[in-house]
Image (cartoon, helix red, strand yellow):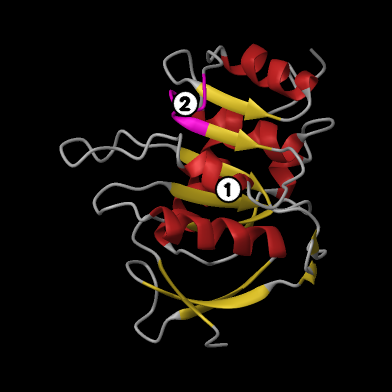
Amino acid sequence: MKNKHAFDMVHGTQEVFRILLEALANPGRVLSIGPYAAQFAGQGRWLAPAVTLLDKRTGFYWEGDPETGEEIRFLTGAPRVSLEEADFVFLNRELQSGKAPHVFSRVKGGTHIDPHMSALLFIDAGTGEGVVTDGGEKPGESVFLSGPGIPPEGRHLDLFPAEVEWCRARDDRGFEYPCGVELVFLREDCSLAALTRKTAFTWGSG
């Protein structure tokens, strides 16, 4: 595998882990893993977080090109499992309208006794271009965020069109707290924004 020795396993994983923690602690803040993703050839934006988070005890689900899925398995030793079983879900296939509800109906959302038994989703945010549906092209939106880790005055996040669909689908799914999932939108420029299960969305307020 071409990336076997490309990543600084100590410093790199520590830094990526720190960035992911910062993103989850500050929902809606846009951060970047670009310098660490660049250490990999090809799909570094997926390999950097995968190598950071996965090990032989953590099942993952990959949806995308077979080569990257196999490289994740090889580099981490983590088993590939079904969407229903996965602790970490990586969705790198071109998103189409209507896909998000299907995913949310299947992923682990935890239970009231064990809310931590839920999935962390890394979702391909695309390029920011409009999503084309039967009703025409849908633009992105600015959403107002509130909840833990967000200043009292709230925080605005400009969402790509695909991200809008995932946020709305999460609300429609109606996870009953403390159940739910965490979302990390991973953009082509290796920037990312995280939204936790406690993050509330208000639309049309920007």
Describe the element under mark 1 as helix, strand or loop.
Answer: helix
Quarter assignment of residue 122 = top right
Which range of residues does the magenta coloring cover? 82-88
Considering only order in the chain, which callout, 1 or 2, is on the residue closer to the N terminus? 2
Identify the amino acid type marked 1.
Ala
Asked if the stretch drawn in magenta spans residue 85, the answer is yes
Asked if the stretch drawn in magenta spans residue 31, the answer is no
Q: Main secondary structure of the magenta part?
A: loop
Q: Is residue 163 left or right of residue 82?
A: right
List x then y, in percent, for residue 202. 46, 78
| Mark 1 surroundings: few (<14), some (14-19) or many (≥20) residues within 10 A | some
Identify the amino acid type marked 2.
Ala
Q: Residue at x 44, y 21 (%)?
A: 58
Residue holding disc 1:
100
**Cα distance in 3D space between marks 2 and 1:** 16 Å
Rendered position, 120 above or below 52: below
Count of all numbered marks drawn on residues in the image: 2
Q: Residue at x 70, y 28 (%)?
A: 7
Which label is found at residue 86? 2
Asked whether 185 or 39 is in front, the reply is 185
The image quadrant where one finds the C terminus is bottom right
**Which circle, 2 or 1, is nearer the viewer?**
1
Describe the element under mark 2 as helix, strand or loop.
Answer: loop
Asked whether 3 or 121 is in front, the reply is 121
Which label is found at residue 3? none
Rendered position, 22 above or below 99: below
Q: Is residue 126 left or right of residue 20?
A: right
List x then y, in percent, for residue 9. 60, 26
